[in-house]
Amino acid sequence: MNRKYRKTVIAGNWKMNMLASEIKPFMEQLKENLPKVRTCEMVLCTPAVMLPAMIKAGKDCKVAAGGQDVSRYEKGAYTGEVSASQLADIGAKYCIVGHSERRQYHGEDDMLINAKVKALLGKGIMPIICVGESLEQREMNLTMEYVAYQVKAALSGVDASQLRRCIIAYEPIWAIGTGKTATAGQAQEVCQGIRAVIRGIYGARPARAVSILYGGSMNARNAYELLAQPDIDGGLIGGASLKPVDFSEIIKATNQE
Ligand code: PEP
């Protein structure tokens, strides 16, 4: 982390878990365990139907709400989709884009992800752009090449003032939901590489200011070491974000110099 230049963000991705009725008890437990001094921005990304309940319950603990996906389209005959205007209208501040589960199960490609990033930016929602390699790509030494391509594609046509509202999440696919975490060194290497890619496009200042998160089996035990890395500015957390105590421990791990 480098709090002098950028925001630290701990974002939970609830995926298709939890019920609206479970949000209040979750928040009460989270509140009990949160540190007095907040050293990060806290976000919970819920299924769209649960966002109103999350926004209401999150106010007390200053937890921002985020979506997990958005339509590339503004409005119209797109049954089942949720637009960026609709997310903004109910008060979502963030939205995950390009999660590997969307890429894998819904065939999302980099062009579509770029369109979604722009749709969100157009409505003032901060995209959390997920990138990351498969195990096969890592073993073939293609990690940085592939991740650099994903970052460039997602940010294509995004200008420097819009970049300030983007968050990148490096999520190696082989570490998501598997219990296998990238070592702090592996995660730092790729996050540093992502910053270098951004520097190459936008220059040193914008690159220094962009928050880059790590995601992939981050938990209360490994968070401190991961967050101690200079280019890891927070976490995108799946499983551990479903347990208020574990989530709060990760939040506490941002309190380091
Ligand atoms: C995720 O889905 O973004 C994620 C990082 O999941 P987990 O923490 O469970 O690996």
Image (tube, helix red, strand yellow):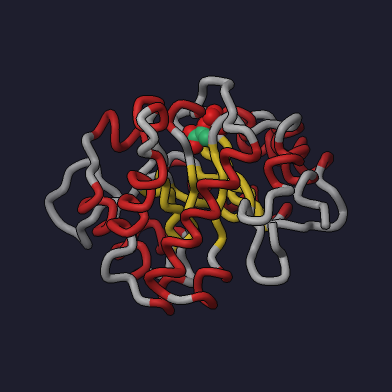
User: Which corner quadrant of the image does residue 253 belong to?
Assistant: top right
Could you tell me residue 1's position as x and y percent?
69, 56
Nearer-the-camera pick, 198 or 117: 198
On the rendered structure, is 21 left or right of 163?
A: right
Instruction: Check the image and report above or below for 61 versus 219.
Output: below
Residue sitting at x 27%, y 29%:
105
Instruction: Check the image and report above or below for 26 versus 174.
Output: below
Residue at the extreme front of the image, as rendered = 141
User: Which corner quadrant of the image does residue 226 belong to?
Assistant: top right
Instruction: Check the image and report above or below for 39 versus 27.
Output: below
Could you tell me residue 190's position as x and y percent?
51, 47
In this orientation, does residue 17 appear?
yes
In this orientation, does residue 22 appear?
no
Residue sitting at x 57%, y 70%:
209
Could you tell me residue 151's position as x and y percent?
36, 55
Residue at the extreme top of the image, as rendered = 178
Residue at the extreme right of the image, as rendered = 36
Could you tell me residue 223's position as x and y percent?
71, 38
Nearer-the-camera pick, 112 or 132: 132
